[in-house]
Amino acid sequence: MDTVWMWIAAALTLMIFSFLYRDNPLYKVAEHLFIGVAAGYGIAVEFYNVFRPNLWDPLFYGHEPSRWWLIVPFALGLMMFTRFSDKFAWISRWPLAYMVGIYSGMAVIGFTEGDLMQQMRASIVPPVSGQAWAGFLHSPGLLTFLNLTANPVIVFGLICILLYFFFSLEHKGTAGTIAGVGTGLLMMGFGAGYGYTVMTRMALLIDRFYFLMSDWLRLI
């Protein structure tokens, strides 16, 4: 069976790669199969890991008196299925509005604690790190010098980027120059993020090629 599944995986990989030539029925079959399997797997995971332990089992098999409040999310979930009815589709707007509101609030809290506060803490640094200065005095060199200038570069770059978003001041003269530096730093950050995404996709591509050449064809 391992050999059969390996040949199936290799065939599906080649069907996906066939899109490099042009869009074709083989690619569409593999694409639809991938989406269907991913959707089915996601539904199964949600059912057994979320729905049953968090709602169904506590509500119908639990013994806690407070379990009856779970009827509210259960009813909201059932209301979602009215989306399939033209006559009662408006009912599904209530649970959708509830979900959008809840997840928006959670996203704001998560972003504030996970991104905003962490970035603020990371940007509050002394102009010169005492540890970096001690390392430079102990072993002068290019690496220790770069460590010594890390904090000033961070502070200067942060000021330039913040000034770029300070729209009440016209970007002319010195302010325009500093804002231009902030623009360049932003472009560097966006480019690094995009490059990281490309590297991730290349790693997946290399993994597929390695599977075909090593596990399937056994050429390497």
Image (spheres, rainbow, N blue to C red):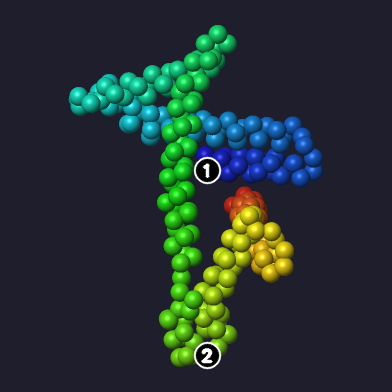
CA gap, disc 1 and disc 2: 58 Å
Amino acid at dot 1: Asp
Q: Residues within 10 Å of mark 2 (few under 14, many from 20)?
A: few
Dots 1, 2 in contact, CB < 8 A? no
Q: Where 158 falls versus 165 (above or below)?
A: below
Tell me if residue 171 can be seen.
Answer: yes
| Residue shown at the point (67%, 63%) measured from the top left | 179
Q: Where 78 falls versus 220 (above or below)?
A: above
Q: Earlier in the sequence, mark 1 or mark 2?
A: 1
| Picture quadrant of residue 158 | bottom right
Q: Residues within 10 Å of mark 1 (few under 14, many from 20)?
A: few
Amino acid at dot 2: Pro
Q: Tell me residue 74's x, y (percent).
A: 37, 21
Mark 1 vs mark 2, foreground winner is 2
Q: Where 4 falls versus 92 (above or below)?
A: below
Is 89 placed left or right of 208 in the picture? left
Q: Name the disc covering residue 140, or none.
A: 2
Q: Tell me residue 72's x, y (percent).
A: 35, 22
Q: Tell me residue 36's x, y (percent).
A: 58, 30
Is 27 placed left or right of 200 in the picture? right
Is 74 placed left or right of 166 in the picture? left
Disc 2 is placed on an element classified as loop
| Count of all numbered marks drawn on residues in the image | 2
Tell me if residue 214 can be seen.
Answer: no
The residue nearer to you, when weighing 90 against 182, is 182
| Residue shown at the point (31%, 24%) measured from the top left | 70
Q: Name the disc covering residue 2, or none.
A: 1
Question: Which quarter of the figure is the C terminus placed in?
Answer: bottom right
| Residue shown at the point (72%, 67%) measured from the top left | 173
